[in-house]
Image: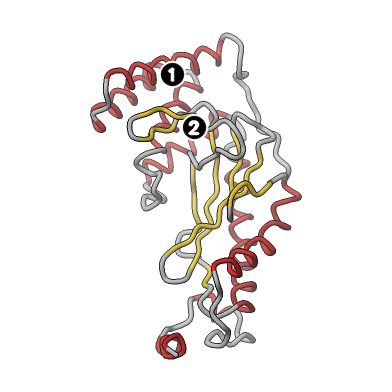
Amino acid sequence: MLVDVLRRFRRPPSSAAATPELDPPKGAPLSAAERDAIVVSVVAPRLKPLGFVEVAPRFWVDGSAAPARRVFEIGLLKGASMIARWGFSLDFAPHLSRRRIAWRRSNRAAQLDVCLDSGRDRASFFYGAEWWSRDMGRLADTAIGQAQETWQRGSTWPGMFDLAREIREREINSMFVGFRTQLPLAVMFLTAKVGDLAQARAELDAYVRERELPDAVAAKLAKRLDEVAGARTGGGAPTDWVCELSL
């Protein structure tokens, strides 16, 4: 079969060297349902004690400390591999879809606003179920450990603001689809949340110019910035908000 020919010429991923007792070229191809079932069986038990629930395929959310929801995702890549992503979904940061403003204020609607990923550390499902289960377990253990450090760092508004700004300035995961679309909004609204409304408005002006947004959309975003900054000092979200982490 063609897949057998490909296996003979395809080099195992870097994780193969770390598991010499398992021969990677052997194993039947997995269907999408089989592949995802193994992901859930491996990842869910590791996240459940931390308060996470699966709200979409390979996408887990802990909304116990909203308006900042912790997120963990296993994302599908080309080349029969997957990557881990994690971070925060912010209830107060809007999403723009076709120049229309949308809000993500529930676990089921959550998306990654502030996001890190496992980079070159990925898991491969090319070599069958046994390999996939072990490789996913290895990736999950490493990524969840790194994610807990991220969630701890972002457990206050100033900490999360610094984290989001560092991701942007260092272009840590610039290939992520939300890096140039959602991250600027997250930085903008976190800037307002920590009390620097003037800089938040400057961020908004740059965002509007770059994307040539209609005046009506720009006005709605500006109004929401004022509301977020006002909540910081006049009721609403406390200035010293701390995410209660289940670490």
| Amino acid at pointer 2 | Phe
Q: Which residue was labeled with disc 1?
A: 225
Nearest to the observer: residue 101 or residue 224: 101
- Crowding around mark 1 (Cα neighbors within 10 Å: few <14, some 14 to 19, many 20+) is many
Q: Position of residue 241 (x, y in %)?
A: 63, 25
User: Which mark lies nearer to you, 1 or 2?
Assistant: 1
Q: Amino acid at mark 1?
A: Leu
- In the rendered image of this protein, does residue 5 appear above or below residue 96? below
Res. 97 image quadrant? top left
Relative horizontal placement of residue 27, taking residue 219 as reference (left or right): right
Q: Is residue 236 left or right of residue 11?
A: right
The residue that appears at 38% across and 18% down in the rendered structure is: 220
Quarter containing the N terminus: bottom left
Q: Residue furthest right?
A: 49
Q: CA distance from mark 1 to mark 2?
A: 15 Å
Who is closer to the viewer here, 29 or 200? 29
**Residue at the image position 53 percent from the left and 73 percent from the top:** 125
> Any mark on residue 136, and which?
none
Residue 10, compared with residue 198, is above or below; it is below
- Provide the residue designation for mark 2: 161
- Disc 1 secondary structure class: helix
Q: Position of residue 102 (x, y in %)?
A: 45, 29
User: Tag 2 or tag 1, which sits nearer the N-term?
Assistant: 2
Image quarter of residue 157? top right
Q: How is the image coloured?
A: secondary structure
How crowded pointer 2 is (Cα within 10 Å; few <14, some 14-19, many 20+) is rated as many
Q: Secondary structure at mark 2?
A: helix
Q: Residue at x 52, y 26 (%)?
A: 92
Q: Residue at x 61, y 11 (%)?
A: 235
